[in-house]
Image: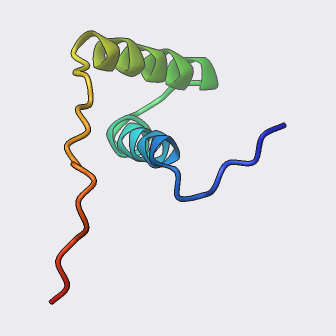
Amino acid sequence: MHWTPPHASWLNQIELFFSVLTRRVPRNGDFHSRDDLIDKMDTYVIQHNKAAKSYRWTYGGTPLKTA
């Protein structure tokens, strides 16, 4: 087991993905069964992955300016 700090950047990306998934599928849908919900979530993930773009880290490591 490896401890990961809660502010890790990859963890933030996962939280953002599930936030978008929640806003786009369950809140705006009409589902006839649990399997219908699962199918629509799977469809969303597949479509999202087809249009995915690589994340480019832009921070250069320089200290931030103080106000």
* Quadrant (top left/top right/bottom left/bottom right) for the N terminus: top right
- Looking at the image, which residue sits at the far bottom? 67
Q: Residue at x 45, y 47 (%)?
A: 9
Return the x and y of residue 3 as percentages of the image width and height: 75, 48
Task: Locate residue 38: give its quadrant.
Answer: top right
Q: Is residue 56 left or right of residue 33?
A: left
Q: Is residue 27 left or right of residue 54?
A: right
Return the x and y of residue 11 as percentages of the image width and height: 52, 45
Count of marks placed on residues: 0
Return the x and y of residue 17 as percentages of the image width and height: 40, 38
Residue 54 vs residue 66, the one in the foreground: 66
Q: Is residue 37 above or below residue 18?
A: above
Task: Locate residue 29: give its quadrant.
Answer: top left
Residue 60 vs residue 4, the one in the foreground: 60
- Looking at the image, which residue sits at the far front? 62
Residue 59 vs residue 10, the one in the foreground: 59
